[in-house]
Amino acid sequence: MSNTVYGLSVDASDSEKLAHFWAEALGRNVAPGASPQFATLDPDGATPRLSFHQVPEPKSVKNRLHLDLISPTFEAESQRLIALGASRIRDVAQGSARWTTFADPEENEFDLIAG
């Protein structure tokens, strides 16, 4: 028997607000029925489902799992993500690889890779 990754769930204090950030960041739509308690992005058929669940406690430590995004227009995309509400945490270069770690509006880390 094998399993398939259905999606990823993200804890949030305001699920609907965070879903709108990620919808803009990924060029997707928030599915109908979103609320501060639960929201999901419309499935696009090509990527895992992203769901956002309200939790009572604030984020307190670094993520153990994060999203890696890649963009051929790295600098422009970095500026766009910041304009959407992301904050830059650190820039990394290892050999020919380059990426920036950002935090979304609820401080969940994610990477943007130059590609």
Image: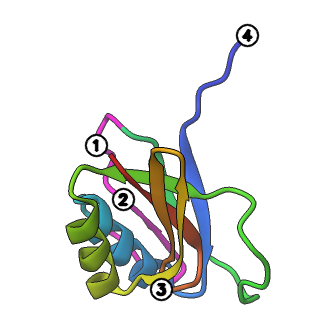
What residue is at 59 percent from the left and 87 percent from the top?
A: 13
Residue tagged by mark 2?
41
Q: Helix, strand, or loop for circle 2?
A: loop
Reading the chain from its start, which is encountered first: label 3 or label 4? 4
Please name which of the two marks, 2 or 3, marks the residue nearer to the observer: 3
Q: Which residues are magenta?
A: 30-46
Using the image, tell me which numbered label, if any, was put on residue 1. Answer: 4
Q: CA distance from mark 2 to mark 3?
A: 17 Å
Instruction: Report if residue 32 is visible in the image.
Output: no
Please name the amino acid that badge 4 sits on: Met
Pinpoint residue 57: horizontal percent, then vertical percent: 76, 88
Residue position for label 1: 44
Please tell me the numbered disc located at residue 105: 3
Q: Which element is circle 4 on?
A: loop
Gap in Å between the C-alphas at discs 3 and 4?
39 Å
Type of amino acid under label 1: Asp
Q: Position of residue 67 (x, y in %)?
A: 53, 55
Give the CA distance from mark 2 to mark 1: 9 Å
Q: Amino acid at mark 2?
A: Leu
> In the image, what residue occupies the spot 68% across and 56% down?
65
